[in-house]
Image (cartoon, rainbow, N blue to C red):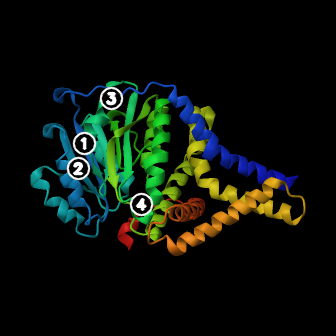
């Protein structure tokens, strides 16, 4: 009986997370009207501070600034600010070479991305803050599309769509499948139903007066929109505002990035557990659990179910489902190993994606382990700069 419990309950949670929750979300959202807000005239546009987080970004910061200077937004209403977070390469020197074109540098030392954002918003007088990353580019109308949502007084945060462009590469094929398609559909559905769970850190805007200073122990693009939502405002999704990025060039670097992201996001909930308490955060608790927490724990649940199924088979008490699950997981593991051998350097349909999923499962488990045992990391170097 106990083994049956440890087989069917984890499996039911996985099915709920991967199938039932997204299907229900998409179905309910399909009944809601999807009408984009009207565009604003130049004289109606709010002032913006575009804040670009940068730590050791010498390879990408110049391109990011060129892209930012080309955005279709009145120059007198847009300030481009680089938040240099303890850079030890030539990032600061490159940014200073753009100062005569209006780019502003805030350099507060290695205090962490969140504290740098807190300090920068405190110095800002703009109507809207847009947070971005140094390794992403925007489509030219991205800012106009984001701020158009603030015509609705109930909207506090507007989040754009993050797109991986190198989908012909093995890592891009994996990330692109999830972020360019699956996650986009889920975010559109969440937005239609009242609000997103967090935002894409590379492209989201908020009303400056609503900004809630964050501790350095959390991941800001996850907790900040939730904090604003708990104050009665919505986070909406604007899929026409794009942030473009290449996935990491190797699976090793993509693995490190994913593990770090899970670690920091999970630790945010460890230090703010009340976000998972429906008595304090309402329906947000249900959505966070269904969309985020179960995603991180899916590999743990699958391993638990596999362990229980194996013991039931060995003990001669198996159900037909035990055998099917055991065979399915064995096949998945075999294809993942095959993908590692022949599809990690060259994109191979199906094998590359399966290897990517297996690697991300492992990264999620590492991120969870580090969140519970090692806590947060306020300052870090990107996987892509680590080689």
Dot 4 lies on which element?
helix
Which sits in the foreground, 263 or 73?
73
Dot 2 lies on which element?
strand
Which sits in the foreground, 15 or 361?
15
Which sits in the foreground, 147 or 309?
309
Identify the residue shown where x is 56% and y is 32%. Answer: 27
Between marks 1 and 3, how big is the CA–CA gap? 15 Å
Sequence-wise, which precedes: disc 3 or disc 2? 2
Mark 4–mark 3 CB contact (< 8 Å): no
Sequence-wise, which precedes: disc 1 or disc 2? 1
**Residue 316, position in %: x, y?**
90, 62
Dot 3 lies on which element?
helix
Query: Which of the labelled discs sits on residue 156, or is there none?
Result: none
Query: Which of the labelled discs sits on residue 81, or is there none?
Result: 2
Between marks 1 and 2, how big is the CA–CA gap? 7 Å
Q: Residue furthest front?
A: 349
Query: Which of the labelled discs sits on residue 172, or is there none?
Result: 4
Sequence-wise, which precedes: disc 4 or disc 3? 3
Between marks 4 and 1, how big is the CA–CA gap? 31 Å
**Residue 29, position in %: x, y?**
51, 30
Q: Kindly report which numbered mark, 4 or 3, lies closer to the viewer in this rendering.
A: 4
Decide if residue 356 is on the left or right side of residue 102: right
Sequence-wise, which precedes: disc 1 or disc 3? 1
210 relative to 313, above or below: above
> Residue tagged by mark 3?
150
Q: Is residue 105 visible?
A: no
Mark 1–mark 2 CB contact (< 8 Å): yes
366 relative to 289, above or below: below
> Residue tagged by mark 1?
49
Q: Kindly report which numbered mark, 4 or 1, lies closer to the viewer in this rendering.
A: 4
Q: Kindly report which numbered mark, 1 or 3, lies closer to the viewer in this rendering.
A: 3
């Amino acid at each position: 009986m106990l083994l049956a419990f440890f087989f069917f309950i984890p499996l039911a949670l996985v099915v709920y997370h991967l199938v039932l929750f997204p299907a229900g979300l998409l179905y309910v959202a399909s009944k809601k009207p999807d009408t984009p807000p009207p565009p604003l005239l130049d004289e109606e546009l709010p002032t913006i501070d575009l804040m670009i987080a940068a730590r050791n970004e010498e390879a990408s910061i110049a391109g990011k600034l060129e892209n930012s200077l080309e955005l279709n937004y009145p120059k007198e209403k847009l300030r481009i600010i680089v938040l240099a977070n303890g850079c030890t390469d030539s990032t600061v020197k490159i940014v200073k070479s753009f100062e005569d074109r209006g780019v502003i540098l805030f350099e507060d030392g290695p205090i962490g991305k969140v504290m740098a954002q807190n300090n920068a918003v405190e110095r800002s007088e703009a109507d809207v803050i847009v947070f971005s990353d140094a390794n992403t580019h925007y489509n030219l109308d991205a800012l106009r599309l984001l701020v158009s949502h603030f015509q609705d007084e109930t909207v506090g945060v507007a989040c754009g769509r993050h797109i991986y462009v190198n989908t012909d590469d093995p890592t891009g094929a994996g990330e692109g499948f999830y972020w360019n398609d699956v996650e986009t559909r889920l975010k559109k559905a969440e937005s239609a139903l009242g609000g997103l769970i967090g935002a894409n850190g590379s492209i989201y805007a908020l009303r400056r007066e609503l900004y809630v200073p964050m501790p350095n122990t959390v991941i800001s693009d996850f907790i900040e929109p939730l904090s604003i939502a708990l104050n009665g405002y919505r986070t909406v999704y604007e899929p026409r505002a794009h942030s473009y990025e290449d996935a990491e060039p190797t699976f090793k670097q993509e693995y490190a990035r994913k593990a770090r992201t899970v670690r920091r996001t999970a630790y945010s909930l460890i230090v703010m557990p009340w976000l998972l308490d429906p008595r304090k955060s309402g329906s947000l608790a249900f959505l966070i659990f269904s969309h985020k927490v179960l995603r991180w724990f899916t590999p743990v649940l699958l391993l638990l179910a596999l362990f229980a199924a194996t013991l039931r088979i060995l003990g001669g008490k198996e159900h037909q489902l035990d055998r099917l699950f055991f065979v399915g997981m064995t096949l998945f593991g075999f294809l993942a190993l095959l993908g590692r051998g022949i599809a990690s350097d060259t994109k191979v349909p199906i094998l590359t994606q399966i290897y990517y999923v297996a690697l991300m499962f492992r990264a999620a488990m590492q991120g969870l382990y580090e969140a519970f045992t090692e806590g947060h990391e306020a300052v870090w170097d990107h996987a892509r700069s680590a080689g």
